[in-house]
Image: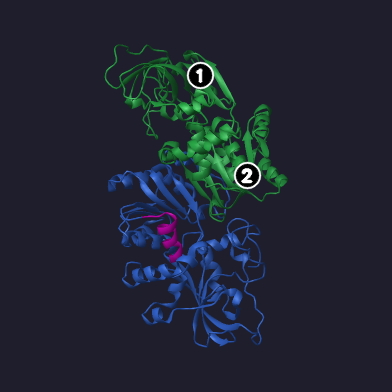
Chain colours: A green, B blue
Amino acid sequence: MSSRPIGLPTLDNFALRALPDGPLDADQLRVRNLWLSVDPYMRGRMNDAKSYAASFQIDQPMTGGAIGEVLESTMDGFVPGDLILHMGGWRDGGIIGLDMMPNKLPAELLAGGMSPQTFLHNMGLTGGTAWIGLLRVAAAKPGDTVFVSAAAGAVGSAVVQIAKAREMTVIGSAGGAQKCAWVSNLGADAVIDYKAGPVLPQLAAALEKLGKPGIDVYFDNVGGEHLDAAFAVANDFARFAICGMIDVYNDGKPQEMKYIIRSIPARIRMEGFIYTDQFIECMEEFYADMGGLIASGAVTIRETVHDGIEAAPEAFLGLFSGANIGKMLVRL
Amino acid sequence: MSSRPIGLPTLDNFALRALPDGPLDADQLRVRNLWLSVDPYMRGRMNDAKSYAASFQIDQPMTGGAIGEVLESTMDGFVPGDLILHMGGWRDGGIIGLDMMPNKLPAELLAGGMSPQTFLHNMGLTGGTAWIGLLRVAAAKPGDTVFVSAAAGAVGSAVVQIAKAREMTVIGSAGGAQKCAWVSNLGADAVIDYKAGPVLPQLAAALEKLGKPGIDVYFDNVGGEHLDAAFAVANDFARFAICGMIDVYNDGKPQEMKYIIRSIPARIRMEGFIYTDQFIECMEEFYADMGGLIASGAVTIRETVHDGIEAAPEAFLGLFSGANIGKMLVRL
């Protein structure tokens, strides 16, 4: 990041810079990166404001999830050739210390055919966010009716598939015919195209068609109009897991909430969450459960891939213009 | 109720009518009412819309809490002279059946000096709402910083006092110097006059003066600007108990929420609740705990009393213009 954005970031906020190189100190890895993750949460970290993680620093790399191959190691337990997940972010490689939390990818899963970049999506941040938000924060259970916004995104598409695998009824929202068709193919019982008209009437019509009185769970990735519509049609004791509000990350405008008052008569519980708070304690259960869902084909993904380190800013900006289906990745 | 209000109710929505009288059937009580309760939640029941309780019917009494004396009984366990709490609502008396849920007031508490109308406020709906919302829904604990709106109201004033008795730091909001002085007398550590200026700057200033980084708990009685301000200053893992949104009961306008997006980085849990959902299971604990707080003087109340059945509509309308300090009652 070369400068802090005001509102929507632009390519001018980014620059490619050389990083220091040299011999390794103790407990370091020299790494060649293979895959970089670009994620909506990074937008918040570009601000110089208190958020849930430290701000990015100007003229320093955008940190975040990346998959790399170890070239040289002074760190116990790592040898050249190991594939690792680390938090070093947008760089073609370089020196990775313990602060970047390097972790070897599980060899048995790779041997079983799982691709390394899966640990940047369904077996990592986005899949973990979907699994924790749906099953733990919103406590969704078989038979529930679940509404998911940004259902064609990396998190949303995992939510749709996990919910279907758990015998829930799923209504997804996405923008445009192509994304909606894909969400439908993932197994959603109904799909709303938010670009085709207001959300609430479409959501109400979908519920009526499905013969459901309302929603038990809302998995929010966007905020704004979708969140308000969810309040409007929530069943008693509905649970909202608030994962993101991408609608308002950039403009900072007030959200007009007409139906939030229904939180009282319907006793709605709305809860914001962050994956990392809960990931460690449920990691083992998550890997076992999600690994099984992926192996069985119940959870799949589409990857939208940009090539080369130079393409990272463009890939990132695409998240805010709806350019991705599934998980947006940069391949080096 | 003689007609349904649109927006703010007026005296024209009410009329005094004679009710059928005659000999008692089985399982009935003839009652002379002594005290009637008027409560904000009744506004919702005046609409012909799905709410958490059945709508009031035109040309039928506004039902709700009342204290009466039994004159005649064909119901097991009740004899003339008994003081009862029942849900027969706005009437000077008449025939009360099992559907009005008559309950004898605990003789030992009355003998100990508790006034009968206490069961319409601190030992009843409003005190129970405060106790359940603060201690159970918001899970407030000693050391927490608690923000309470409508802190001079029947529910709010109980929240302030319960929180202080439990060693929490309390910031109350009320409208006008007289109410603010009263909230301060109840023990609040800081008081905001929402009529004197915008809520958020006053709330931030109060926190700074108290040396607190933010709030751990928000007890919401009003919605709107207060709720948004609470989102703005919430600490990580803050809990919001949403009890009422009196700001928007009448106008139905959208609420502009600028800070609801903080529910993600701060992992805020917001939960709407209704007293009756949880009251039965915790009634024994509530009576013991609240009875002790009242007996020790830790929880007191001011009653705003109107006299005569004809005054009930005016007393009710006063709830929406801020005319009451403490609990609004009608004495017959």
Rendered location of residue B276, percent (x, y): 52, 64
List the single residue furthest toward the right: A209
The residue at which mark 1 appears reads as A330
Residue B313 counted in the magenta span = no
Q: Quadrant of residue A164?
A: top right
Q: Quadrant of residue A282?
A: top left
Query: Magenta segment range?
Result: B127-140
Rendered location of residue B213, percent (x, y): 32, 43
- Residue found 65% across the figure and 71% down from its top: B60
Question: What type is the residue that disc 2 sits on?
Answer: Glu
Q: Quadrant of residue B49?
A: bottom right
In this rendered view, identify the residue nearer to me: B309 or B33.
B33
The residue at which mark 2 appears reads as A167
* B323 relative to A313, above or below: below
Rendered location of residue B114, percent (x, y): 39, 77
Disc 2 sits on a residue from what chain? A
Q: How many marks?
A: 2
**Residue B231 visible in the current orientation:** yes
